[in-house]
Amino acid sequence: MKGLGYRFSILAVFVLMAAFSFGQSEQELKNKKRKLQEEIEFTNVLIEETKKNQTTSMDQLVKINRKIEVRAEIINTINEELGLLDKKIEKNKIAIASLESDLQELREEYADMLYYSYKNRSSYNRLLFLFSSSDFNQAYKRLKYLQQYTSYRKRQAQLIVKTKESISKKISNLEEIRTEKQVLLSSLESERRNYSNERVEHEGMLTDLKRKEKDLYKDLKRKQRTAEKLQKAIEEIIREAIRKAREAAAKAGGSSKGFPMTPEAQKLSMNFSANKGKLPWPVIKGVKTGDYGAHPHPVLDGIIVNNNGVDISTNTGAMARAIFDGVVSKVLIIPGEGKTVLIRHGEYLTVYSYMSEVFVNTGDKIITKQELGLLVSENANTKTTMHFELWKGMKTLNPAYWLYLK
């Protein structure tokens, strides 16, 4: 009988621990889904802005493509949530079955005790049991036994009540989970419909843009020339910075290899590196519409485009902002492509491109999230996009691994 109470306690602890671990995973999934839905809502706002132009553009296609990707992530997240709920339902069923088994055993034991108490209910029998003791010690032990037996019977009655309450709560919880599952299934069906509709919209846009291949090739060549100019300018700035650093180190009697840094620059570089994955976005609100590295052109077959950074679409009037403390290394002007700000963070360099106005100058000390300038808004396409790059020495890095994924 004592073992049953112990088993009941262990079961309760197990159920609570399971509920806690599931709760954590569920919350993470819900947070992820909420952020993805917020991104879709903001992307819709940006798409509506570009639709004012009345003609299908590459920017519209890229945004709808990103929305499809996010929608697929939402569907996967909902499926993960459903998987967790199925596990919770199964855990609750097992817990209920175990509790009901315990309840049956408790009732049987309690019935036996009641039957025994009924047979030995008279005061005469209890006195006879005490006075038939061979000595005082035995009589004392028998008295304690009677007291403990009565106390245990009360505890058994209380345990039966608690077990019944636990079963009732588990059944209620099970119904809540099943209701939540139905809501999720409905949400999943809605997301699948949206996904299907967006795929159709994407195919329509793609067909329209295929008719404009000549213009797209021309635009691609222009962007490639701009990217090459920017890359050459950045590389020259970095080489010059390394040269000056080596000269200063040689004069001070230090090493003139690599990228020598002052203690202050070394500390800044280490702090920047320590914040990998936690750095803020270079705009307050935006949607990543251009990935780092080489990837197929979204319309032109057989064309591979290379991106030294990421492109982020945002709303009209948005500002570029610094992702970390640093010093403005250079302000560049790329004809036809706006202004670019380079900020050094020790060994690291961040690049913020496509601004119509810049609020900082070369040599200025910058703090995290400080506004650097107003991004260009293209009236023809009613779009606002910033280009962001991250360098370490002469090598580009993927900003997606460094920026905080909101």
Image (cartoon, helix red, strand yellow):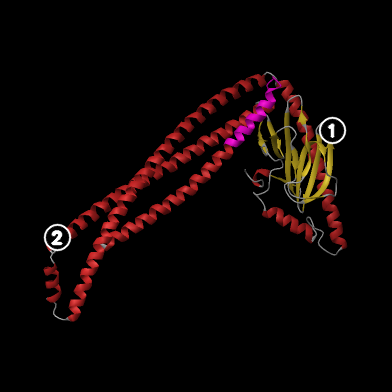
For disc 2, the marked residue is 118
Quadrant position of residue 207: top right
Graded by Cα atoms within 10 Å as few (under 14), some (14 to 19) or many (20 or more), the crowding at tag 1 reads few
Q: Where is residue 332 in the image (x, y as percent from the top left)?
A: 84, 40
Q: In this view, does 139 lie to the left or right of 65?
A: left
Residue 290 visible in this rendered orientation of the protein: no
Q: Is residue 341 left or right of residue 105?
A: right
Residue interval drawn in magenta: 37-57
Dominant secondary structure (helix, strand or loop) of the stretch shown in magenta? helix
Q: How many labels does the image show?
A: 2
Q: Does the magenta stretch include residue 200?
A: no
Quadrant position of residue 360: top right
Q: Indicate the amino acid at tag 2.
A: Tyr
Q: Indicate the amino acid at tag 1.
A: Pro
Q: Position of residue 235 (x, y in %)?
A: 80, 44
For disc 1, the marked residue is 335
- 102 or 205: which is nearer to us? 102
Q: Where is residue 196 in the image (x, y as percent from the top left)?
A: 53, 26
Quadrant where the N terminus sits is: bottom left
